[in-house]
Image (tube, rainbow, N blue to C red):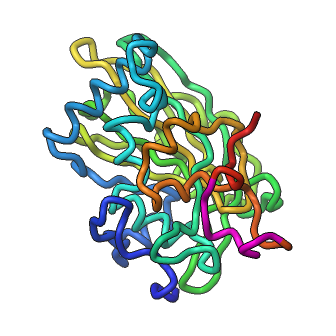
């Protein structure tokens, strides 16, 4: 992959952290990877406070912060390690420059789950065989992959073994056969999951079979931000942050929200910019 076309810093000027060879292999093999402990306690505290206010006291926030990725939480959108992964598995190089990401924001939601909350619903898988319009696809060439719709999960509280983090049927993004129901029971040995400190990221292709499950920790809630990214000329979810939120972001971060197109008789004639007329926001 020609890294010269991809941004080397994020919107805050921090150096992008490229995927290493081990991470690339694991992601292709399993369909997911975890990146533990990316946020310091100093970064994490205002993000957690913002997420809880967004969920339960939204009207108390200024308009430019009334979004999952508003205010202090906007740093999660293009964290250097996240950009490094998305540069490798998702970026459309012809639509990337040092000032513009080669991928775009798709949709997001914040999950706050207390002990006993259950979300066991296996879905996805066999994405290597999906048609491209579904976005839930996984493509491969020798030494390169493209993950289509990609999910980035920020675990804002610690997740210990057995707590109930997201579960994955590793490798199912390339499965050729239908998934037997009995293999996806909750106690199946095929499910894999993770443990991680607060401020960690789990990244997976939506082409992979995955599910939530019952949260069991009675002393610590699960607080997670589930954000999807897509190619610049595709969008699966309808949501987009309000204009006031996007306007508060640095220019490079704003390019995550440009309109869903590639190239046509526009000026400029290729989608490497964001402005008020070129936005992915739906009316």
Residue 65's quadrant in the figure? top left
Q: Main secondary structure of the magenta part?
A: loop
Q: Nearer the viewer, residue 121 or 54?
A: 54
Measured from the top left, where is residue 25 in percent x and y?
Answer: 44, 72
Nearest to the observer: residue 14 or residue 166? 14
Question: Which image quarter is the C terminus in?
Answer: top right
Does residue 68 appear left or right of residue 19 in this picture?
right
Is residue 280 placed above or below 51 in the rendered structure? Answer: below
Between 52 and 11, the one nearer to me in the picture: 11
The residue at the point 49 percent across, 59 percent down is 30
Q: Is residue 51 above or below residue 105?
A: above
Residue extent of the magenta highlight: 266-275
Q: Is residue 25 magenta?
A: no
Residue 239 location, quadrant: top right
Please name the residue shown 51% across and 83% down the image. 5
Residue drawn where x is 42% and y is 35% of the image: 70
Find out whether residue 271 is within the magenta segment.
yes
Residue shown at 14%/40% (left/top)?
42
Q: How many marks?
A: 0
Residue 268 placement (x, y as % from top left) = 72, 74
Q: Is residue 142 left or right of residue 78?
A: right
Q: Is residue 269 left or right of residue 104?
A: right
The x and y percentages for residue 16 are 33, 69
- Image location of residue 87, percent across then percent down: 48, 70
Nearest the viewer among 110 and 145 is 110
Q: Is residue 175 left or right of residue 250?
A: right
């Amino acid at each position: 992959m020609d890294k010269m076309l991809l941004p080397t810093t994020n919107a805050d000027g921090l150096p992008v952290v490229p995927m290493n060879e081990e991470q690339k292999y694991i992601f292709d093999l399993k369909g997911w990877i975890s990146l533990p402990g990316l946020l310091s306690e100093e970064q994490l505290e205002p993000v957690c406070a913002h997420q809880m206010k967004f969920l339960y006291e939204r009207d108390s926030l200024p308009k430019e912060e009334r979004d999952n990725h508003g205010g202090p939480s906007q740093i999660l959108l293009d964290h250097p390690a996240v950009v490094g992964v998305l540069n490798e598995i998702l970026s459309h190089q012809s639509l990337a420059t040092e000032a513009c990401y080669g991928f775009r924001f798709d949709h997001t939601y914040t999950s706050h789950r207390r002990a006993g909350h259950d979300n066991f619903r296996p879905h996805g898988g066999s994405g290597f065989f999906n048609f491209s319009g579904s976005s839930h696809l996984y493509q491969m060439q020798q030494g390169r992959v493209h993950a289509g719709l990609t999910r980035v999960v920020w675990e804002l509280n610690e997740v210990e073994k057995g707590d109930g983090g997201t579960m994955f049927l590793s490798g199912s993004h390339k499965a050729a056969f239908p998934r037997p129901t009995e293999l996806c029971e909750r106690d199946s040995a095929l499910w894999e999951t993770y443990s991680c400190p607060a401020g960690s990221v789990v990244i997976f292709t939506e082409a992979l079979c995955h599910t939530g499950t019952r949260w069991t920790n009675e002393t610590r809630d699960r607080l997670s931000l589930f954000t999807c990214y897509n190619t610049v000329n595709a969008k699966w979810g309808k949501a987009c942050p309000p204009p006031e939120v996007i306007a508060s972001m640095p220019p490079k971060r704003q390019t995550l929200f440009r309109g869903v197109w590639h190239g046509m008789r526009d000026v400029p004639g290729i989608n490497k910019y964001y402005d008020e007329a070129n936005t992915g926001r739906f009316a």
